[in-house]
Image: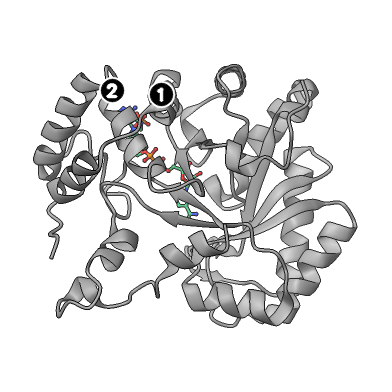
């Protein structure tokens, strides 16, 4: 089967491939097969995962099983650099974007990347340089679509307004363990920290322009502090998840996924699990529609107040 590559909005669940160090190539092949058989065609990777070891591993699997490619939407990213001495910095220059893309294609053993994202904002980014790099990669057929990750509102606008280059995705952290993006909207005009515009109304800007919000680390507490499902700080959230899981005959993870997907058609959830049972629980979340009181109860269960 050849999948429809333009149906970005149909791909509500994405398989994240950041933690491939836990899998050998055989297990990775089995995970990809499982995903495809269960309707997950979108795979997210980056040149920085495992310092390019993740792309190399996926590339080896694709070399061994080239038949997989036509059923996969492959997304990779560039822009984060980690030197051997652990110094890290960001680079979104023309040269870095183009060179990184060709290096990723080589490691992945593929002719083109479906979605290519700028992984993190580089303060020195020049919109015209980015546009030149992306246009050339698109014209040469190496990249089909373009997006960004962890980009603030003004930076997305700057890039778009200056160049008209279509930005289809902004990948951001959002989940019950990291709610800044919606907390800010719900605290508008309040004299508290939450009411400050940390993300510059990014959430509704993305809705307005139909930019996909890909939620990374959806079950992680903040920046890699562990899973919400097992952490004592999320006891109340787990009680509510348990009760709703019972009501909807689903798992807690399916409810936590629905909590995100219910926010709009432009939302996608990237599971980072490499355990097919856990991935399946995320897939199950596509079918659940929470009531408004349930959604807000989950939101409040994380310790967030409603004014
Ligand atoms: N753009 C960016 O800057 C950025 C940054 C980080 C990540 N990402 C992307 O986001 C993806 C996901 O990141 P992540 O791995 O941190 O997120 P995650 O899926 O939220 O995983 C966090 C934790 O949740 C657990 N978990 C997931 N599903 C579960 C389930 N059904 N039941 C119980 N526990 C469950 C995982 O355990 P198990 O592993 O045991 O299932 C893991 O410990 C990455 O692979 C990557 O593609 C992007």
Along the viewing direction, whichever of 3 and 205 lies nearer the viewer:
205
Asked if the residue at label 2 sits under 8 Å from ligand 1, the reply is yes
The reply to whether residue 44 is visible in this rendering is: no
Q: CA distance from mark 1 to mark 2?
A: 8 Å
Q: Which mark is residue 284?
A: 1
Secondary structure beneath label 2: loop
Image height of 121 relative to 126, above or below:
above
Quadrant field for ligand 1: top left
214 vs 306, left or right, is right
**Residue 112 location, x and y as percent?**
80, 45
Label 2 Cα crowd, 10 Å radius (few <14 / some 14-19 / many 20+): many
* Residue shown at the point (56%, 70%) measured from the top left: 90
Q: Residues within 10 Å of mark 1 (few under 14, many from 20)?
A: some
Task: Judge by depth and name the residue closer to the eye, 191 or 128.
Answer: 191
Point 77% across, 65% down: residue = 134
**Residue furthest front in the image:** 292
Q: Quadrant of the C terminus?
A: bottom left
Q: Position of residue 153 (x, y in %)?
A: 48, 73
Quarter of the image for residue 162 reads bottom right
- Write down the quadrant of residue 97 in the picture: bottom right
Cβ–Cβ under 8 Å for marks 1 and 2: yes
Q: Look at the numbered disc 1 and give the secondary structure of its residue.
A: helix
Query: Which residue position is annotated with label 2?
Result: 251
Q: Position of residue 208 (x, y in %)?
A: 52, 64
Residue 243 lies, with reference to residue 152, above or below; the image says: above
Taking the image as shown, residue 263 lies to the left or right of residue 247, namely: right
Q: Quadrant of residue 56?
A: top right
Residue at 83% x, 58% y is 138
Residue 17 placement, left or right of 291: right
Camera-side residue of 177 and 154: 154
Where is the N terminus found, in terms of image quarters?
A: top right
**Comes first in the chain, label 1 or label 2:** 2
């Amino acid at each position: 089967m050849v999948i429809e590559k333009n149906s970005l909005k149909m791909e509500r669940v994405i398989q994240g491939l950041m933690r491939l160090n836990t899998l050998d190539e055989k297990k990775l092949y089995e995970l990809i097969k499982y995903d495809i058989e269960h309707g997950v065609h979108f795979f997210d990777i980056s040149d920085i995962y495992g310092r390019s070891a993740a792309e190399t591993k996926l590339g080896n699997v694709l070399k061994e099983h080239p038949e997989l490619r036509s059923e996969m939407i492959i997304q990779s990213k560039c822009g984060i650099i980690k030197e051997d001495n652990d110094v890290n910095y960001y680079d979104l220059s023309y040269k870095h974007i183009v060179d990184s893309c060709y290096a990723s294609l080589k490691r992945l053993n593929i002719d083109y990347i479906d979605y290519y994202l700028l992984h993190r904002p580089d303060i020195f980014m020049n919109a015209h340089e980015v546009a030149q790099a992306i246009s050339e990669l698109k014209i040469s057929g190496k990249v089909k679509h373009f997006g960004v990750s962890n980009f603030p509102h003004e930076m997305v606008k700057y890039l778009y307004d200056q160049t008209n280059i279509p930005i289809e995705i902004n990948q951001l952290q959002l989940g019950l363990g990291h709610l800044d993006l919606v907390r800010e909207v719900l605290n508008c005009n309040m004299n508290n920290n939450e009411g400050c515009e940390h993300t510059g109304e990014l959430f509704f800007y993305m809705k307005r322009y139909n930019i996909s919000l890909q939620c990374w680390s959806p079950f992680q507490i903040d920046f890699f502090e562990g899973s919400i499902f097992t952490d004592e700080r999320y006891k109340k959230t787990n009680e509510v998840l348990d009760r709703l899981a019972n009501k909807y005959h689903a798992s807690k993870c399916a409810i936590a996924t629905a909590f995100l997907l219910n926010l709009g058609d432009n939302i996608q959830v990237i599971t980072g699990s490499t355990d097919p049972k856990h991935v399946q629980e995320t897939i199950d979340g596509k079918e659940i529609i929470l009531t408004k009181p349930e959604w807000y109860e989950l939101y409040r269960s994380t310790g967030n107040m409603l004014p």
